Amino acid sequence: MSGLSMVVDYNVFQEGEVAVVLALPPACAGASRKVVMSTAEMNYAIHSSKLDAFKIGLAFRKFRGDGKELLEAVLRYALKDESVAGLQDPGARFRTKRPRDSRPLGW
């Protein structure tokens, strides 16, 4: 994990380091929220006419405490729990058995 992208209403591009504070959802009902603090560098700010907003790209530079490990654990859990469409096991395509006569398009 090296960064994040987000959509914002205004062009907030800032050269140099910026502070990123993420409030993670509680692990279970009644639990307190965990907060991850990091410094990051903005890589881009692109206006999207489709969204009528700006897409901002941030590259993490440094996390406070165990923030990186905590964020990675929460993301792994969320992706496993939600079965996010579009994600697949990187090795899945190599285990696929194709018919012997299958060829890539254009042959």
Image: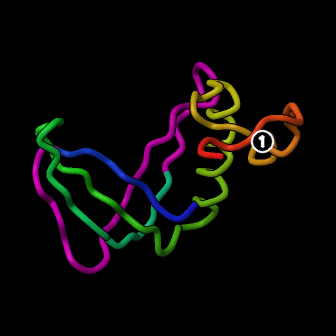
Q: Which residues are magenta?
A: 9-35
In this view, the residue in front, 45 or 34, is 45
Q: Quadrant of the N terminus?
A: bottom right
- Residue 31 in the image, given as x and y percentages of width and height: 59, 28
Whether residue 106 is situated above or below residue 82 in the rendered picture: below
In this view, the residue in front, 27 or 8, is 8
- Residue 84 in the image, given as x and y percentages of width and height: 59, 29
Whether residue 68 is situated above or below residue 80 in the rendered picture: below
**Residue 100 relative to residue 85: left or right:** right
In this view, the residue in front, 87 or 14, is 87
User: Which residue is situated farthest in the top direction here?
Assistant: 29
For the point 41% across and 70% down, which residue is it?
39
Q: Is residue 29 magenta?
A: yes
Q: Is residue 22 magenta?
A: yes
Q: Which residue is mark 1?
A: 93
Q: Residues within 10 Å of mark 1 (few under 14, many from 20)?
A: few
- Residue 90 in the image, given as x and y percentages of width and height: 74, 47
For the point 26% across and 44% down, which residue is it?
7
In this view, the residue in front, 32 or 67, is 67
Whether residue 87 is situated above or below residue 81 in the rendered picture: below
- Residue 78 in the image, given as x and y percentages of width and height: 62, 33
For the point 58% across and 21% down, which residue is it?
30
Instruction: Please tell me whether the stretch drawn in magenta is mainly helix, strand or loop.
Output: loop
Q: Quadrant of residue 26?
A: top right
User: Which residue is situated farthest in the front direction here?
Assistant: 107
